[in-house]
Image (cartoon, grey):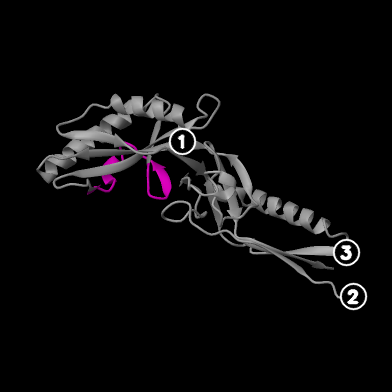
Amino acid sequence: MNIQKLLIGLSAFGLIIPVGAHAQDSGAVIVTAQRSDRSSYEYYDDDQSAIGLTRTADYFVKPMFVSSDSRDINERKQELHAMLRAAIERSRGSGISLVAGSYSLRPVTIENYEELPLAYGGRPDTNRVQIYARIPVDSSVQRASDADKLIEAFAKTIPATGRSFIETGTTALAIDNPDQYRFAVVKEVAAEAKRYAGLFGSDYGVEINGLDSELYWQQASENEVFLYIEHSFKIAPK
């Protein structure tokens, strides 16, 4: 009797941060949340893989926009840099570190803060520099609201120079070197595929494709991230 092969396709699409949340280097990267309708749970995307690894994030990160609206461009730069320098000095010993980057984050220091790109500030004669305040996710800070309070309090201690000012954005998560979890993700996929094959009896095996694909990640809860690989597996008679 011919036994029909069963194909189970599990695909994961959708980038998690604007520049593509897949592993490229060993730096810390930002993870943001996307609202979706999977089981009425706000963090999961209907198109992402259902199999992967969930783990606690390494950091809470909150964007900080250091701006100035002085009319003269040189004066704006001086005011921005003075406030950035003050932020760096105030961060020492505070438990908050300052980092920057659109994808992989690097420390902001006295040696490199003047190299940060000067962006348009949203209105004429206004420029801003974006950095992130970063706090480790640990036993003392496990909720985004706690991280928010600490960072907002820190921002208020930074003195303004001239017409400079600081605005903050929405807190997200960050993880160090996400590619270090690739093997753990593959183990999760293999275990789940084997479990599915076992439902059909010992005469069935499983073939998994796509495990050499990019590693992706997405926020899974207030302080957790979900890492996964686009893949599919096929269960068929041996």
Q: Which residue is drawn at 81% across and 63% down?
A: 205
Q: Provide the residue span drawn in magenta.
A: 100-119
Q: What element carries label 1?
A: strand
Image quadrant where one finds the N terminus: bottom right
Give the number of the mark in front: 2 or 3: 2
Residue count near mark 1 (Cα–Cα under 10 Å), binned few <14, some 14–19, many ≥20: many
**Which of the 4 quarters of the picture holds residue 113?**
top left
Of pointers 1 and 3, the one earlier in the residue sequence: 1
Which image quarter holds the C terminus? Answer: bottom right
Residue beneath disc 1: 60
C-alpha distance separating marks 2 and 3:
14 Å
At mark 3, the secondary structure is loop
Amino acid type at image mark 3: Asp
Residue type (three-letter) at the residue carrying disc 2: Met
* Residue 93 x %, y %: 40, 24
Residue 30 at x, y percent in the picture: 45, 45
Report, in whole angstroms, how far the alpha carbon at label 1 lies from the one at label 3: 48 Å
Does the CB distance between marks 1 and 2 fall below 8 Å? Answer: no
Which of the two discs, 1 and 2, sits closer to the camera? Answer: 2
Q: Mark 3 or mark 2, which is nearer the start of the sequence?
A: 2
Mark identifier at residue 1: 2
Disc ID at residue 203: 3
Q: Does the magenta stretch include residue 102?
A: yes
